[in-house]
């Protein structure tokens, strides 16, 4: 009979857990903020994901983003509800966009550019899922200008916050 394997957490696992906890706290706090339109949120947890991406790489950022989606949905009692799937689809598309964009020259694609790309990827993934599943009507695309404006504003602000955090502690990058 084979002995059971014991999983042990290393420093990287602990780091991902700390970042994921911060992202979860921001997401839960953000859920308490009233919004004028469903889906219009600042995306504060994306600051954490961008920090992880730029300091530790895409793999860690993907873990943080996905742990945030699952844990936040569980804590808010929305696991496997439509909002969960919208959040998951937005996060997956955003991660795919970031995975491609992080390979672009840092000179032109820093935290603000990456944040904008992630914000548009996120809202694009959500809109696509909503169109295919929840609102099978072309009228849904009439909301695109509102979501684009909020993605531009919040993507820029979150990118600037991320850039400030990176500048405050640059020695932590890519460890």
Image (tube, grey):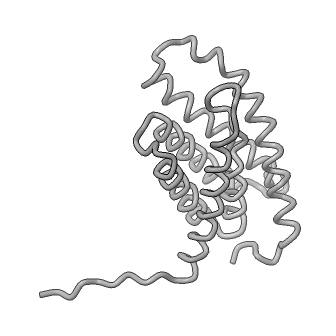
Give percent across and percent down for residue 124. 60, 32
Number of numbered labels in the structure image: 0
Residue drawn at (75%, 72%) of the image: 173
Residue drawn at (69%, 34%) of the image: 34
Give percent across and percent down for residue 73. 49, 48
Which quadrant of the rendered structure holds the N terminus? bottom left
The answer to which image quadrant residue 26 occupies is bottom right
Residue drawn at (78%, 40%) of the image: 154
Answer left or right for 127 relative to 8: right
Q: Residue furthest left?
A: 1
Answer left or right for 135 relative to 141: left
Which quadrant of the rendered structure holds the C terminus? bottom right
- In this rendering, the answer to whether 87 lies above or below 11 is above
Answer left or right for 2 relative to 175: left
- In this rendering, the answer to whether 108 lies above or below 121 is below
Residue drawn at (56%, 28%) of the image: 127
Give percent across and percent down for residue 78. 46, 42
The answer to which image quadrant residue 132 occupies is top left
Give percent across and percent down for residue 105. 77, 56
- In this rendering, the answer to whether 172 lies above or below 150 is below
């Amino acid at each position: 009979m084979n002995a059971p394997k014991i999983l042990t957490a290393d420093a990287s696992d602990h780091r991902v857990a700390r970042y994921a906890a911060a992202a979860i706290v921001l997401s839960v706090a953000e859920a308490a903020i009233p919004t004028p339109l469903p889906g219009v949120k600042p995306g504060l947890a994306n600051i954490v994901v961008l920090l992880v991406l730029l300091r530790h790489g895409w793999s860690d950022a993907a873990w943080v983003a996905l742990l945030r989606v699952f844990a936040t949905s569980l804590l808010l009692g929305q696991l496997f509800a439509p909002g969960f799937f919208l959040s998951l689809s937005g996060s997956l598309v955003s991660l795919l966009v970031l995975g491609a964009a992080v390979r672009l020259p840092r000179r032109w694609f820093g935290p603000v550019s990456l944040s904008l790309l992630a914000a548009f990827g996120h809202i694009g993934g959500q809109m696509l899922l909503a169109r295919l599943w929840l609102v099978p009507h072309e009228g849904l695309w009439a909301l695109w200008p509102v979501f684009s404006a909020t993605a531009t504003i919040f993507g820029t602000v979150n990118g600037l916050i991320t850039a400030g955090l990176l500048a405050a502690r640059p020695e932590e990058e890519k460890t």
